[in-house]
Image: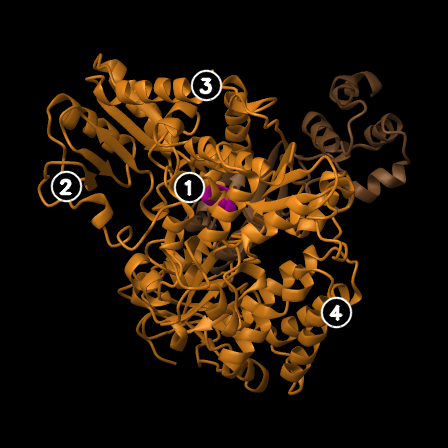
Amino acid sequence: MREQLAEVLDPYKGERGAVIPILQKVQEKLGYLPEEAVKEIARFLRTSEGDIYGIATFYAQFRFTRPGEHLLKVCMGTACYVRGGELILDAVQRELDVAPGGTTSDLKFSLEWVACFGCCALSPVMVVDNTVYSRMTPSKAKQILDSYR
Amino acid sequence: MGFAKIRERALAEWEALELSGKPRILVGAATCGRSAGALDVLQTFNAELTKHSLDATVIQVGCLGMCYIEPIVEIAKPDRPRVFYSGVNADIAVQLIEDYLLNDNPRPDLALGMLGEGSLDGVPQLFDLPVLKPQVRVALRNCGFIDPENINHYIARGGYSGLEQALQMTPEQVIEEVKRSGLRGRGGAGFPTGTKWEFCRRAGGTPKYLICNADEGDPGAFMDRSVLEGDPHAVLEGMLIGAHAIGASEGYIYCRAEYPLALERLDIALRQMEEHGLLGDNILGSDLSFHIKVKEGAGAFVCGEETALMASIEGKRGMPRPRPPFPAQSGLWGKPTNINNVETWADISAILQQGGDWYAGYGTEKSKGTKTFALAGKVNRTGLIEVPMGIPLRQIIYDIGGGIVRDKAFKAVQTGGPSGGCLSADLLDISVDYESLTAAGSIVGSGGMIVLDEDSCVVDVARYFLDFTQKESCGKCVPCRVGTKQMLDILKRITQGQGEPDDIDLLLRLGQTVNQGSLCALGGTAPNPVLTTIRYFRNEYEAHINEKRCPALVCKELIAFYILPDKCKACMICQRNCPVDAIKGGKKLIHVIDQTKCVKCNTCYEMCPERFSAVVKVSGETIEVPDEPIPLGEKE
């Protein structure tokens, strides 16, 4: 793990307030924050693992379990909600049999809800990996999920 | 290199673009444009140009704000007016290349508007369109017209002339100019910007920091995203001006991680600034030295609050702290810090470019200038707008917004995100400014504006906002942490048909406690959606509590779907599409919904062909239908 993370951590040597960017870069590299990674980050920053978990668990961005192949985010911001966002989330949960924050048993999809992508005028919105799908309906959601399966 | 030379080169490049004798194709490809298919359109244009061996310049631009008809494309042919097209897809792109580029037929039937001299068969001037006419674009001045990844475009249109001007003034003079403009913080608090700068200028201590708050946490708000994606330099120039005025040497941009395109554009813009001597030591040969770092948010709404934001930059949990001391005296790492919102910084560069008096010429006496709003919800023309402060709310919703979708009845407009409130129909003539909205119980906030119609349940909307603020509460203050949870539980009970007679008073009392006992604005304003909806829509709460009825037919536990036996034609569309197989019936057998299985997903209601309209949604009543499917035409 140390060698794996060395190139991520080294540029931050001596920098103040670097813990959040470090956590972000490590998650970008590994897909989530495994225990060994947190240990290594704590060692690098000369602080306790408890300290790191205290910071990491505060922020919704950080995951501590392995994500699925595709990261699915359904927007539950106000504009999307008012135009049926909850129906989309319900439809996705039903289709994939997974709750927000979890991963499907076949490890294909991880589901998250997000407060807002800033695409409010094209609500409801769903993002799969880096693709933004707009003007969603429950049936469109099913179609899109099928295209990834 | 002196600025004069930089500007000369930029203008030359801009002119060369216009006089190149080559057509220009500008495609609006900000995040919303992309979600509507803009990248596909871009690809198609490039492919078609190659196919026909045509030489044209294709540029990706930011958002014009008309999200409801994206993707938007501008085609500028030499010696022709500029023509704008909306709702462009790959097919239309192919047609435009063939018809306009090859055969000089601009296809007025596809055109949205035009700019420049000349006329086109019934196509209006772009800024005469009802959606654009009332708008005054200051923060958004360049969005949709320039390549945000080309600093020369920004400079050619007056960019960095504000900085040039500011560097010839003393810091105190710059602060005076900002005060004269009457600019108030556009992030939501509306604090006079010039005054805030003065506090920080007068504070002792080095280094001084500047922060650009680009967290934009309000769901429903995307103004800052559009500015950062479409014209990042407007913000960066503002920060440089601020650095000179305040005496700051380091800046941070705290941008939410959910905006990857904005982050990318910022990185490119910062690099270009360095290349042009606009960032770093001795900027443009002056005494000003300034460095900017970008920090990504990590998914915490509370980090939009200034002290929580600073804690986050310092690598801590984003928990607010009491003020005083204010950031101007003691902010980042205990040093004097000035923090402003993205839009405020973008306005600053315009103000130093065109003058404080010019900006103060717009707006009302206490709310000067212009404000962006993210218009979303049940209006026809959803998108990003910028209007003079003081514009009547009605004008925004009906003239600019084009009224309610499917001509349904307007119910309320929610402004200011989770910190704001719902304004009812009799407030439609209210002037949109800081004081007026606050007096009505809401706030201008960051600019989110969500329109609700007769099909929206305000109790459900209040519950939705409490759900959000309760999740995002950092937990420090008991009234916020526990109070929002209790208010949420009460609202959940009400929407689930378990409301009790004392609930409304309880919500009002709790709301007061949460508001008064919270350290920061998250808790302080969390009760607002509840308080305003009770104030203006008490009857809806009473229907839920006393009659177990949801007038808007939204709250799942209070609604039921029925298939009317005399209207059902047994077409089986609803049965095939029901996600939980709750519909019994078959060919020539009337369909029946099994109420024990129904999950109220709305699918059958939406899919029943309009000419049959056999599915009804009701609340507070039951409809007599057969228990089992009966043959078509037979009545039990």
Say which residue appears at 33% left-offset and 68% top-offset. B408
**Residue type for callout 4:** Gly
**Total numbered circles:** 4
Separation of residues labelled 1 and 2 (CA atoms): 36 Å
Evaluate whether label 1 is on the same chain as label 2.
yes
**Residue type for callout 1:** Ala
Q: Earlier in the sequence, mark 2 or mark 4?
A: 2
Q: Which residues are magenta?
A: B343-347
Which residue does the numbered mark 4 point to in the structure image?
Answer: B517
Q: Quadrant of the N terminus of chain A?
A: top right
Which residue does the numbered mark 3 point to in the structure image?
Answer: B2
Looking at the rendered image, the disc whose residue lies closer to the viewer, 3 or 1, is 3
Evaluate whether label 3 is on the same chain as label 1.
yes
Chain letter for the part of the structure drawn in brown: A
Question: Compared to B358, does A70 lie above or below?
Answer: above
Say which residue appears at 22% left-offset and 22% top-offset. B23
Chain letter for the part of the structure drawn in orange: B
Evaluate whether label 3 is on the same chain as label 2.
yes
